[in-house]
Amino acid sequence: MKIGGFEKSTLIDYPDKIACIIYTVGCNFRCPYCHNPELVDETAPEVTLDSIMRFLRKRTDLLDGIVITGGEPTMHDDLPKVCYRIKKMKYLVKLDTNGTRPAMIKNLIDKKLVDYIAMDIKSPIDKYSDIVSRPVFGEAIRQSIKIIMSSGIDYEFRTTVVKSLLTPKDMENIVKEIKGAKRYYLQKFNDKRILNPQFKNKVTYTDDEFKKFKEKFKKYVKECEIR
């Protein structure tokens, strides 16, 4: 696994936990609004896994869990081995994923190597390839949704909302794909640091519009919140 960043402490990335963050290098998507461009274009300075493990061994009494994000962590075939090493130290593991490798997600769940999964849903299934600028097998996204919802572990789904990319109808079609889900977050687009500079100054919906989405989507999911 190639690692391009490590954050020693976070109070917001793992709900109700004190955690640190491992950022993996590489992604099979090219979302123009991605806020980790150096991971996607693989220019981030590498951080060694051994150095992270040494840090974690010294923090077992201070940290609750580890967030593994990217990039796209499931692209790395040694992800289960890394999760196993972390779990051996009694940490909780949260995985952030785009859901394109359902077999990997199922493997991690079946082997009890993850405790929380956050899956990004980029768009309605039929628009995925246009939004992420790469070919996408839509059924893989649906499989991952089903696996996560039936897993018995804690999870969330989330969508970064760019007004020029997602219409209100698109938003509703997304939430229909996860009908019955435990938790869904609408994330406001922020253009401070993004993969495609042409997306600078693109807008998201207004606060009032987000509130209307939230109220409307509550009939599909158990909890809908705004970030």
Image (tube, grey):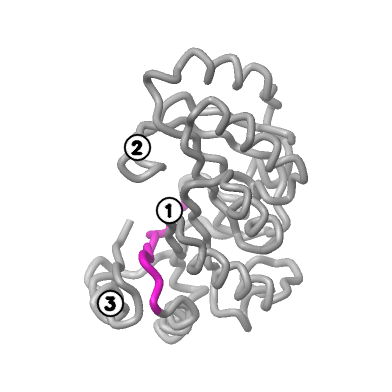
| Picture coordinates of residue 73, whole percent (x, y) | 65, 46
Which sits earlier in the primary sequence, circle 3 or circle 1?
1
Image position of 165 (left or right of 110): left
Residue position for label 2: 17
Furthest-bottom residue in view? 169
Location of the C terminus by quadrant is bottom left
Q: Is residue 193 above or below residue 163?
A: above
Q: Is residue 35 above or below residue 183?
A: above
Which stretch appears magenta?
180-191
Residue position for label 3: 218
Kindly indicate whether the residue at mark 1 contacts the one at mark 2 (C-beta within 8 angstroms). no
x 69%, y 55%: residue: 104
Q: Does the stretch in magenta take in 42?
A: no
Q: Residues within 10 Å of mark 1 (few under 14, many from 20)?
A: some
What secondary structure is marked by label 3? Answer: loop
Q: Amino acid at mark 2?
A: Lys
| Res. 2 image quadrant | top right
